[in-house]
Each structure stands twice: as C-alpha cells, then as structure tokens.
Image (cartoon, helix red, strand yellow):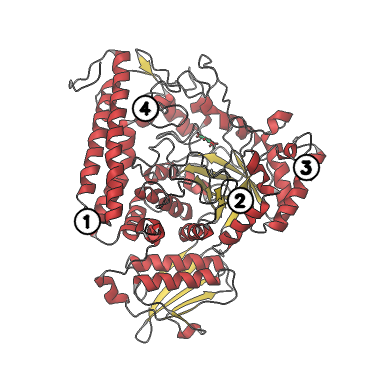
Amino acid sequence: MRNYKNSRDYGCWLNYDLLPPAFLAKYEQQFPTMAVPRGMALTQSITAELRRGLGGLVGQVPNLVEREDEAAVALRLEDAAGSPEGFKLTVRAGEGLLKVLISSPGEQGLLYGTFAFLRALQLGEVEPGWELQESPRSPLRLINHWDNLDGSIERGYAGQSIFFKDNHLVEDLDRVRDYARLMASIGINGIAINNVNVHREETHLIAAKAEMSRTISCIFQDYGIRLFLSVNFASPLEFGLDSADPLDPQVQSWWKERTRQLYAEVPNLGGFLVKADSENRPGPFTYGRTQAQGANMLAEALEPFGGVLIWRCFVYNCQQDWRDTTTDRARAAYDHFKPLDGQFRDNVVLQIKNGPMDFQVREPVSPLFGGLERTNHLLELQITQEYTGQQRHLCYLVPQWKEILEFDTYARGPGSTVARIVTGSVFPLRWTGLAAVTNVGSDPNWTGHTLAQANLYGYGRLAWNPELSAEDITREWATLTLGHDGDVVDTVSQMLLGSWETYENYTVPLGIGWMCNPGHHYGPNPEGYEYSKWGTYHKADHLAIGVDRSVQGGTGFAGQYHLENAQMYETVETCPEELLLFFHRIPYTHVLKSGKTLIQHIYDTHFLGVEQVEEMLAKWQGLADKVDPETFAHVLERLQGQLVDAKEWRDVINTFFYRLSHIPDAHNRKIYP
Ligand code: GCW
C-alpha cells in the first residue's frame, strides 16, 4: 500500500506544490539563501520549514548562510518592544534578488512569520515594497482533544487518537510532529491532549503516566505549542486521600505537590483544563463549594509555574424532568458563573461554549459574553461536527463562528462584540482567546472529510485574528489546499460558504436544536431527546413548537443579556427569525416575515436543503478533472452520502410536523402520511 503520508490529503494546506508558471516567473531562483538565528529552541523547525516550503514552491532548497546581509530570506530576532508572537515581514528588491526580512522580538514570532511568508508566496503577495506586520489578537489560541488513552475519541469522526493507543503513546510520533507543524502554521499555541471527561486511566497523566505527557510536550515545544492536560477534579481520591474538597488543606497541598512534580517532568506544560460538576463529572459542588473555590485551588497550585487553569462553564442540571418547566438549561451557565464574576484568581480562565446549550447548528450567543467583566475567559467552539453532520456532511462552520464573533453584546455600549471581548479590548483581561474541540484523528486525511480540513484551518486563522472575513479565509484555504485553478477555488469556496445554511435547512429549524438520535447524535429523530433528562426540549405539540424564554411569561433567559439584546429577544416581533423557536413558542400557523406560515417555512426549507445538496454535488462533479483524483473520489462519495442523509432528514422532519399539525404542504410535495 502506498504510504498515506505522501497523499495530498495528508499534507493539508502545507503541500507546498510547485507554484504555477505566472508565479514562478516572479519567484524562481529568488530565494537561494537564508539566514536563521542559531541556538533558538525553534531554529530547527524554522529552518526545516523554509527548506521544505521553498524547495516545494519554487523548486530550490535555500542554503543556510551565516550573515543576514547575504541571505535572500533573513530572520532576525529583534530586541524590540511588541509581542514575541508577532512579526514583521518586509520585502525589497536587492541586487537581482528579492530580499525578505522576517523579524520579531520572539522566536515564536519568527516561526509564525515563516509560515506567513510561505503562505503569502503561494498567494502571490510577495513583491518589493510589500510589508506585513501582524501579531495574534489574543494570547490563548487553543485546541482541545477529546482523546481517551485507549485511543478512542469522544465525538471523534476521523478515526482514532493520533496520540494514544491501548493506554500507551502511539508508535508513530512523527505524525504528532506533523500535527504540531500544521497547528503552528495557523498560530495555535496550546493543545489539551486528553478528553475533558477524564476517566480513570487519564487521571494518571499527571502522575505515573506523566512521561507520556512529557514526550508529546517535547514535540509540541519545537513548534511553540504548550501542552495542556485535562484533569480530574477528584484526582486526590484516586491517590489515597479521602476528600477532594478544595478548602481542605490536605487537598490543597496534594495538588501543589503533584503540580510541582509534574512541572519538573513536563516543563512545557501550559496548565490544566477542567470539566467539573458537569455531566456527572466530580467538582466542588460535592463539598458545598463554589466553582470559584474549586478553580482557585487548582490555579494556586499552577501559579508558581506560570500555568493557567482553564475551567469550563458547561455546568447544568443533566437530571431534568421534562415536565418541569421552571428549569431552563439555557440559563445555567450564566446563573452559575455571573454571580462569581471577580472572584477568580488571575490565572483562572473560564472557557465558555459559544451558545447556552451545546454546539447546535444554531443557537444564540451565550450571555456570559458581555456578562463577565472581571474574569478571564475564552470562547469555546466545536470544530468536530458532533451535531453538524459528523464530517460525513459538508458543513463549513467559519460563517457560523463569524456570526458569533460579530455578535454585539452591548456590554460597554454598541460595538462590544464577542470578537473584541475575547481579544481583550472590551474589558482589560490578562488571559483571553479561543479554544476549540478538534476534528482530528488518525484517518489519512486527518479530519475524515477532506473538506472538513477547512474548519480546522479556519478556526486557527480566526483565533489568530477574528476580524478576518469568512470569504478571505475560505479562498485562502482552497488555494493552499487545492491549488490555483480559479474555477476550483471559486467553486469550492461557494460550496463551503453555503454549506452551513444548507445543513440547517434540511435539519432543525429556527434555533430549536436537537431532534437528532440520542447518544451518537447522528441522523434525525424529532423526539429523540424530548422526554429525556438532558433538558433539551422543543415541546412540539399539534398546535405549536418552541420554548418561551422571554422574561414576560417565559423562563427569563432572554433577560440574561444586556438591555438591547434582552429587548430584541423578548418579543416575537423583534426576535431574529432564525432564533424564533429558541426564544418563543410559536403556532404553526404564525406568519413569518416572508409571508409564509411557520409550518410552510419548515416544509420549504427542508425541500430546499436537499436541492442545495444536489447542487453542491453537481458543482463538485464539475471539478472531476481539476482536483487530485483521490481527493475527488473521496469528497464525491461523502457528498453522495450527504444527499441520502439529507433526504432522510427532510422526510423525517416534514412527516413529524405534518402528523402533528395535520396541515398539508401548500405545494403538495411528497410528505409521508
Ligand atoms: O456536547 C456534549 C457532548 C459530550 C461532551 C460534552 C462536553 C466531552 O455530547 O460528549 O463531553 O458536550 O462538552 O463536555
């Protein structure tokens, strides 16, 4: 069998194919030499990247020279102010050659500058007089793996873990290196390697199994990435203590000592990530303590080593009764954490899922954004497509993330967007940024669906700079990954950019969420979660659907937002229609702004969604001789599967509503009786 590592899909956006003739005319033989400062931790990675990148793109591997003034591409560590992760790139005309200078106060900046240079070269931007000065907008740009030590991945749709197998490290650590390189190329600087649901085996990653963490962290270190570990709040119990109470001095000193020893073994540790009091994980509530008391205890242990404690806000009652209408899961994160704002230590960072529920295809933004003013926090996104087609469906999430980032919280008046909050420009917070659950696994193409690589890429780019536009990121990814053919770039960009809306059209309407099969969450099942304990009800009956979350007469969730948004969500008339069923209970006969009734809207969007998948499929078929045959065949197969599944969604959802409402489709299309 051919080594899958030579495939284009494995190379992702770093294939570095020879540039097309028009570009080569500009760049060929322009970069014969490079100068890279010696003795840096990242010297080797930077040098190797330039060799590989230029060797591939312009067909000439540059020679290393000592003196900066003799080099076509020179890297300079500058003793200047500014972010050590930022860089400046300048290009000028030298004697017959281009002269590229990449400078930064830090070696990490030089690494990012190197990747930016190679990217710009592929996009044809490098020319005399061109300059680029960038630094990441926030200090934490994190990836979370939900990998278990046995090699399985919770909500993983691309094979097994690339780190773990049968409770050991995988043999192929080169692949971990390739991964670190991919992540560094998009600016990721921290990776949590294990599942936030920390089971028994994983508890030992901070102790007997710390050697595993160390090995991975050494690889990460070569790419400027810090390793994070998800830890079990009840670890002390596993190690012989009879309590995990955060106020118990014995527990406190146990964590301090364990953390000290861990740092001795894993110096490149960024800190801990904790899921506590959430979905049956242990936490401070067991001891009658607050989330702040729990987080602060761990943060104190990390503090001497500069570590940060990332504490998730996904705390809610998962033992609900569907008949209980007073408990609203959407309220939970805000209700738990808002009152604690200001009580957390400086090195605690709260990690908040984008929406108040759980990574649905459409949700409002969590009101904790704009709600928290004095506590460090991160936006948590889900790259892995748990509820959005599990990498069998094309569902490109960058447009969704852009909407979230552009949402105005009004926390400090107009313009207080989530993007500005998570980059620290609304509230002066030390630690801000983004985290996302990755979609990566051991599949040869990393992400199951090759086009799902765009989600991974797009996340990194947005974490670096949330102001980049979805269109720019998409075209950039398509060019780097699939080459310069304008038709391919246009077509694939269109497919990607429309795919989230398409997915929404044939799945769950107007923000209601769920309606999927319980457990694995794939495929339609309108009542799959309706009577379960998880608090995710849509309450459809024969007349209406939706949950009233207004203040007047509902659960009051709408009132958790700042006034402008609270008022907007409060009434049916002002609530954005795409979220109508999230905030209100609406009769099927209610007339929407389009002039259609709700029920007709549901029927129409479901028929439309399937047609849109048919169009995507046709578009892709049109690229048959323009993309790599292996990639072509694979994506084709996925799209064909998506079409079958989209029809199933359409029919199941439409039938469900028809049976409940008895209202026929105005166009008499086929809905099962
Ligand atoms: O969406 C839910 C998932 C769980 C996950 C949890 C979480 C890791 O279904 O699998 O557990 O969210 O985010 O903690």
Q: Amino acid at mark 2?
A: Phe
Q: Residues within 10 Å of mark 1 (few under 14, many from 20)?
A: few
Q: Are marks 1 and 4 in contact (CB under 8 Å)?
A: no
The location of residue 100, given as percent across then percent down, is: 42, 76
Q: CA distance from mark 3 to mark 4?
A: 47 Å
From the image, tell me which residue sits under label 2.
228
Q: Secondary structure at mark 1?
A: helix
From the image, tell me which residue sits under label 4.
524
In this rendering, would 415 be left or right of 271? left
In this rendering, would 50 be left or right of 249? left
**Residue that appears at 75% across and 45% down:** 255
Q: Nearer the viewer, residue 387 or 347?
A: 387
Q: CA distance from mark 1 to mark 4?
A: 34 Å
From the image, tell me which residue sits under label 3.
252
Q: Amino acid at mark 4?
A: Pro
**Residue that appears at 41% across and 28% down:** 513
The location of residue 649, given as percent across then percent down, is: 32, 28
Q: CA distance from mark 2 to mark 4?
A: 35 Å
From the image, tell me which residue sits under label 1.
487
In this rendering, would 161 be left or right of 605? right
Q: CA distance from mark 3 to mark 2?
A: 20 Å
